[in-house]
Amino acid sequence: MKKAFVTIMTLSRIPLAFLFGYLCIELEQPLWPCLIVFLLVSLTDWLDGKLARTLHATSALGAWLDVSCDLFFIIVSCLSLWLTGRMPMILPIVIIIKFTEFLVTSHWSRQIGERQNAFFFDPFGRLSAALLYGLPILTLLVSSIVPKARIGLFAMTILFCILSSAIRIVHCLRMEHKQKNPAL
């Protein structure tokens, strides 16, 4: 029952993602309604993890669902921003590539025996993930204040994703090398 409650909370981000996308597409000025939806998404993301740990209801499936629902929200919201001309198509593509790299390097890290957790989180990657998570609402905010500043926001996002990916790949390569050559 505990896991079901936490899972339902996690999965609630799917309809909230569609609501965010709908509001972006249908409203001329979607900032405030989307901000409310974004706060609900963020609250469910924070609460499901907190409750899973408190209720001892954590699982690999729950971790996977959490990350997948986060990705789903990010992709749906960014695609809606692209459809309305508020975001270039390159960003949803970068996000999908970054998520794929996250899964691959997490699996790689487990394979070389460095970690037992479902996912490998690095400090710079956490910063990149937070930026990607907040990107839809930041885009709407910047668009309403200084529309031309979006270019800097998008460039910074892409740069952070590239740096995070490089750090993760180098880390896995070093761990693999260390495993094959323990004397070094």
Image (tube, rainbow, N blue to C red):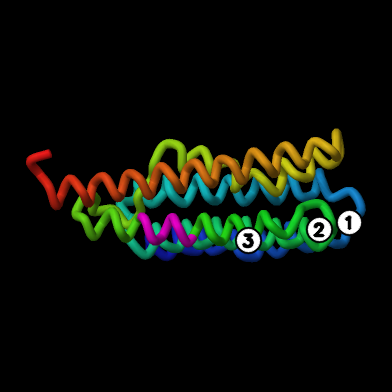
Camera-side residue: 22 or 96?
96
Badge 2: how crowded within 10 Å, few (<14), some, or many (20+)? many
Q: Secondary structure at mark 3?
A: helix
Residue 85 in sight in this render: yes
Q: Where on the picture, by quarter, is residue 6?
A: bottom left
The residue labelled by disc 2 is 23
Which residue: 70% across, 56% down?
78
The percent coordinates of residue 178 (x first, y second) are 17, 45
Distance of label 2 from label 3 (alpha carbons): 22 Å
- Asked whether, in this view, residue 139 is left or right of residue 177, the answer is right
Q: Where on the picture, by quarter, is residue 59?
A: bottom left
- Asked whether, in this view, residue 138 is left or right of residue 45, the answer is right
Q: Which residues are magenta?
A: 100-105
Overall secondary structure of the magenta stretch? helix
Camera-side residue: 72 or 170?
170
The percent coordinates of residue 98 (x first, y second) are 52, 55
128 inside magenta stretch: no
Camera-side residue: 14 or 164?
164
- In the picture, which quadrant includes the C terminus? top left
Q: Say which label, 2 or 3, has the lower sequence index.
A: 2
Which residue: 14% across, 52% down?
180
Q: How many marks?
A: 3
Which residue: 45% across, 63% down?
65
- In the picture, which quadrant includes the N terminus? bottom left
Q: Which mark is residue 93?
A: 3
